[in-house]
C-alpha cells in the first residue's frame, strides 16, 4: 500500500479483481428432452414433468431449488436468460448482504426485526423470520464458498448501510449477488437439478383451484409444428422467483429485459400487495452500464454538476444548500442514505440531492459525477475542505483513512474495486466524468405471501423480489437476505408437503388438458397480425407513463390520469392484441401485455392510496399544494414540491390488489402481528417440529 500520493494504490491480486467483477458463471448442464407432447390447436406442445418448477435463476430461485433438491424434491429451473437477471447483473460499490451482526457485538433478533419493518406496511412475523433466518443464510453461503471478508479472528466485516443504524451490512464487493448466484448455481448443478434456459414462463395453468404447471415460450425451439415455441411444464408446485418488474420504468437501473412475473400472477388471480412501494436512487443510465451509485462512489465526495444543450456547466447543488460543508456532507450521506426518501428533502437533508438531480433532468440537462474534482463551493461560502465536514462524515473518512486530496484518490483508498468495475465496462472514471440520473431500482411490493412463502393460489410460492414482503423501506441488502431466507422456507414447506417428490404421470394430463388449451388460447389472443399496437409502442407508452406519473415525485391528478390511460391501453390490447413478426418478438409481446397489466395494478394501488389521503413515504413524495411539508433550498421554499406527510395509520396496513375479470380490486388488510414476548420453549415446541405441525399444511 502506498501512502505517499493522493492516488493510493492497493495491490489486489488479479484473481480477486476477476472474481469480484467478471465472476464467470458455471456452464449449464445438457438440457433434458421433453418426455412427450400434446396437440393443442395448431401447436404440438412438448410436455415436461417435474415435482416443482422454479421460475427464475437468480439468487432466491436458486436457493429454493437447491434446498428442495437437497430434500429429495424433483425440481427444475426455468430461466429467460440464465445469469442475465437482476441478481447476476446488478450491484453497487460494495453490494450489500444484510444479516445479523457477527463481528464482535451481539445482535438481538427482535431489534433486527424491528429495524427491518421500521418503515411500516410490513408484516411483523415476516420481519422476525428474516432476522432469525439471516445467520443461517450467511453461514450456508459461506459454506458454499461465498468469499465474505473476515477480520483476523473470524468475524465477518460489517458496515452501515441505508436504513441501518447498527451496521449489519457485509459485502464481497460490487458483485455480491452475482457471486451468490455462482455458488448456488454450482451447488444446483452438483445436485443434478435441470435448467431450461431461454425459457419464459407466460401463463400459470390451474386446475381445480390449484396450480397444475407453467406454459412457457421457447423461441429457439419454434418450428412448423410449434410456431410459437410453446412448452408445458407440468408440476403440482411452482415457485415464482423471476425478480421484479424492471421494465416498468424508462428511468431504471435494472438490467435490460427484467420483466418479473407480476402480470402472470395477476392473470392467475393471485393477490399482490404493497404495489405502492418502490425504491428510487442515483445510478448510471440504462443505455450504458446501469449501476447503483451508492456507498463509496458518493462517500468519496465527487463533484456533481449538469450540462445544458449548449454545453455549459451548471453547479446546481450550490443553490440547494446553505454552506459548502452542508453540501459536501449530504453528498457523502447518499452513500448510506442512498434511496430517495421524502422526509430527507426537509431540513436540507440528503434527498435534496435527489430532488435537485431530478429537476435538472426534467429541465433537459445531463448530470455528471466527476471524481477528479472536489465539490464546488456554495456561492459566497468557503471552498471545500476535508477539515470542514459534519462530524459523522469526518469521523467516517478518518476511520477509513480517506484523507486524499481528490475524490478518485479517496475512492481508490476505500474501494479500488469500484473503479475497476467501471473500467471493465469501458468507462474510466479516473479520466472522465460519469453520467447518471435518479432511477427506479427495486419493487418493495409484489406477490402476497404467508410465513412459508405461499401465495393465495394453492401450490404457488413466491420468493425474492417477486414477493411483496419488504414494506415501505428496508435496510440496504435486506432483500438479498430475504430471498435466501424465504427461498429456504419455501423449499422446507414444499418438501414437508410431499408434493414435489415425484413428477406427475401421464395419466394426470387429461384433467389439465382443458386448462392448458385455455392458456394457449390466452397467449394466442395477445398475438395479432396487423395490430396497430406493437412491442416498441406499448413499451414506450408504459415506461413513459410510469416514469412521469408514478415515479419519485407524484401528483394526485397525474396518478389518476395515468390510471385512466393504463386502463385504456389494456382495453386496446384485449381488443386489438399486439403485432409480432417472429417467435422472439412474440415472447416480448406477451411480456409487454403483462407489463401493461402490472402497470395498471400499480397505478390502481397508488390512486386508491392517494384518494384515501395517503401521504409521502418511502420512495415517493405525494406533492400537494395543501401539503404540510415544504422542502427548502438555499434560494427559498420549493413550493412545487410541497408534499403530504405520511399518515401513521397507513403504515399499520397494506393494500392488496387482485384482478377480478378485467377490473382491479384494491382493499386494505392490517399487518400481521408478532408477539416479541412469546418465547419458544424447547420441550413444549419440539413435538410440533417432529410431527411437522409447524408447516400448517392443513391451513389451505
Image (cartoon, grey):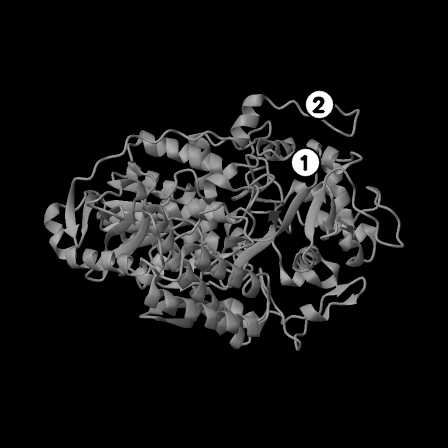
Q: Quadrant of residue 370?
A: top right
Q: Which quadrant holds residue 141?
A: top left
| Above or below 451: residue 422 | above
Q: Residue at x 53, y 49 (%)?
A: 108
Q: Quadrant of the N terminus?
A: top right
Q: Earlier in the sequence, mark 1 or mark 2?
A: 2
Left or right of residue 519, residue 404 in this image: right
Location of residue 422 in the rendering, given as x and y in whole percent from the top left corner:
61, 35
In the displayed structure image, the side of residue 53 where residue 396 appears, left or right: right
**Against 120, is 684 above or below?**
above
Residue 564 is situated, as x and y percent measured from the top left of the image, at: 46, 73
Q: Residue at x 51, y 30 (%)?
A: 22
Question: Which residue is labeled 2 in the image?
Answer: 1
Regarding residue 210, the answer to whether it shows in the image is yes
Residue, disc 1? 429
Q: Disc 2 on helix, strand or loop?
A: loop
Q: Residue at x 65, y 31 (%)?
A: 416
Q: Residues within 10 Å of mark 1 (few under 14, many from 20)?
A: some
Q: Categorize mark 2 by other alpha carbons within 10 Å: few (<14), some (14-19), many (20+).
A: few
Amino acid at each position: 500500500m502506498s501512502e505517499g500520493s493522493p492516488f493510493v494504490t492497493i495491490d489486489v491480486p488479479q484473481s480477486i479483481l476477476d472474481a469480484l467483477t467478471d465472476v464467470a458463471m458455471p456452464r449449464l448442464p445438457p438440457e433434458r428432452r421433453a418426455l412427450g407432447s400434446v396437440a393443442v390447436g395448431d401447436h404440438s406442445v412438448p410436455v415436461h414433468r417435474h415435482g416443482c418448477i422454479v421460475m427464475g435463476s437468480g439468487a432466491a430461485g436458486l436457493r429454493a431449488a437447491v434446498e428442495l433438491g437437497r430434500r429429495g424434491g424433483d425440481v427444475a429451473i426455468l430461466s429467460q436468460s440464465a445469469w442475465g437477471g437482476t441478481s447476476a447483473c446488478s450491484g453497487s460499490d460494495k453490494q450489500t448482504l444484510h444479516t445479523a451482526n457477527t463481528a464482535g457485538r451481539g445482535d438481538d433478533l427482535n431489534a433486527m426485526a424491528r429495524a427491518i419493518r421500521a418503515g411500516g406496511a410490513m408484516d411483523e412475523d415476516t420481519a422476525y423470520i428474516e432476522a432469525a433466518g439471516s445467520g443461517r443464510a450467511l453461514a450456508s453461503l459461506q459454506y458454499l464458498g461465498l468469499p465474505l471478508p473476515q477480520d483476523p479472528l473470524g468475524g465477518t466485516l460489517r458496515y452501515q448501510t441505508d436504513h441501518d443504524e447498527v451496521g449489519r451490512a457485509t459485502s464481497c464487493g460490487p458483485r455480491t449477488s452475482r457471486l451468490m448466484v455462482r455458488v448456488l448455481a454450482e451447488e444446483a448443478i452438483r445436485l443434478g437439478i435441470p435448467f431450461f434456459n431461454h425459457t419464459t414462463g407466460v401463463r400459470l395453468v390451474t386446475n381445480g383451484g390449484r396450480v397444475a404447471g407453467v406454459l412457457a415460450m421457447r423461441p429457439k425451439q419454434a418450428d412448423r409444428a410449434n410456431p410459437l415455441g410453446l412448452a408445458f411444464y407440468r408440476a403440482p408446485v411452482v415457485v415464482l422467483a423471476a425478480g421484479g418488474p424492471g421494465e416498468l420504468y424508462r428511468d431504471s437501473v435494472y438490467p435490460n429485459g427484467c420483466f418479473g412475473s407480476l402480470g402472470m400472477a395477476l392473470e392467475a388471480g393471485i393477490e399482490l400487495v404493497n404495489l405502492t412501494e418502490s425504491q428510487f436512487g442515483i445510478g448510471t443510465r440504462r443505455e450504458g452500464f446501469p449501476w447503483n451509485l451508492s456507498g463509496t462512489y458518493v462517500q468519496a465526495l465527487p463533484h456533481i454538476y449538469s450540462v445544458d444543450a449548449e454545453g455549459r456547466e451548471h453547479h446546481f447543488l450550490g443553490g440547494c444548500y446553505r454552506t459548502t460543508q452542508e453540501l459536501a456532507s449530504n453528498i457523502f450521506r447518499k452513500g448510506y442514505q442512498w434511496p430517495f426518501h421524502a422526509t430527507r428533502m426537509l431540513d436540507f437533508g440528503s434527498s435534496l440531492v435527489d430532488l435537485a438531480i431530478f429537476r435538472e433532468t426534467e429541465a433537459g440537462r445531463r448530470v455528471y459525477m466527476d471524481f477528479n474534482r472536489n465539490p464546488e463551493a456554495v456561492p459566497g461560502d468557503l471552498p471545500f475542505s476535508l477539515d470542514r465536514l459534519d462530524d459523522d462524515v469526518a469521523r467516517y473518512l478518518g476511520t477509513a483513512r480517506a484523507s486524499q486530496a481528490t475524490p478518485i484518490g479517496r475512492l481508490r483508498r476505500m474501494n479500488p474495486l469500484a473503479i475497476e468495475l467501471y473500467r471493465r465496462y469501458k468507462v474510466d472514471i479516473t479520466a472522465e466524468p460519469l453520467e447518471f440520473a435518479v432511477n427506479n431500482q427495486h419493487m418493495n411490493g409484489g406477490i402476497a405471501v404467508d410465513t412459508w412463502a405461499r401465495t393465495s393460489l394453492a401450490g404457488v410460492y413466491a420468493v425474492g423480489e417477486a414477493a411483496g414482503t419488504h414494506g415501505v423501506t428496508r435496510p440496504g441488502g435486506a432483500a438479498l437476505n430475504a430471498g435466501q431466507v424465504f427461498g429456504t422456507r419455501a423449499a422446507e414447506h414444499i418438501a414437508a408437503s410431499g408434493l414435489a417428490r415425484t413428477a406427475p404421470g401421464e395419466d394426470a394430463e387429461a384433467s389439465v388438458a382443458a386448462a392448458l388449451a385455455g392458456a394457449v388460447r390466452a397467449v394466442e389472443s395477445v398475438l395479432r397480425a396487423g395490430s396497430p399496437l406493437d412491442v416498441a409502442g406499448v413499451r414506450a407508452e408504459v415506461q413513459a407513463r410510469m416514469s412521469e406519473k408514478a415515479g419519485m415525485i407524484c401528483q394526485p391528478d397525474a396518478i389518476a390520469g395515468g390510471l385512466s390511460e393504463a386502463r385504456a391501453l389494456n382495453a386496446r390490447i384485449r381488443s386489438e392484441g399486439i403485432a409480432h413478426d417472429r417467435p422472439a418478438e412474440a415472447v416480448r409481446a406477451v411480456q409487454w401485455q403483462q407489463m401493461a397489466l402490472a402497470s395498471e395494478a400499480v397505478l390502481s394501488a397508488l390512486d386508491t392510496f392517494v384518494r384515501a389521503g395517503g401521504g409521502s413515504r418511502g420512495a415517493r413524495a405525494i406533492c400537494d399544494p395543501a401539503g404540510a411539508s415544504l422542502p427548502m433550498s438555499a434560494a427559498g421554499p420549493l413550493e412545487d414540491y410541497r408534499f403530504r406527510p405520511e399518515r401513521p395509520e397507513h403504515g399499520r396496513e397494506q393494500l392488496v390488489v387482485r384482478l377480478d375479470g378485467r377490473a382491479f380490486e384494491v382493499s386494505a388488510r392490517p399487518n400481521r402481528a408478532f408477539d416479541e414476548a412469546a418465547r419458544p420453549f424447547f420441550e413444549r415446541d419440539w413435538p410440533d417440529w417432529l410431527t411437522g405441525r409447524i408447516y400448517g399444511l392443513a391451513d389451505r
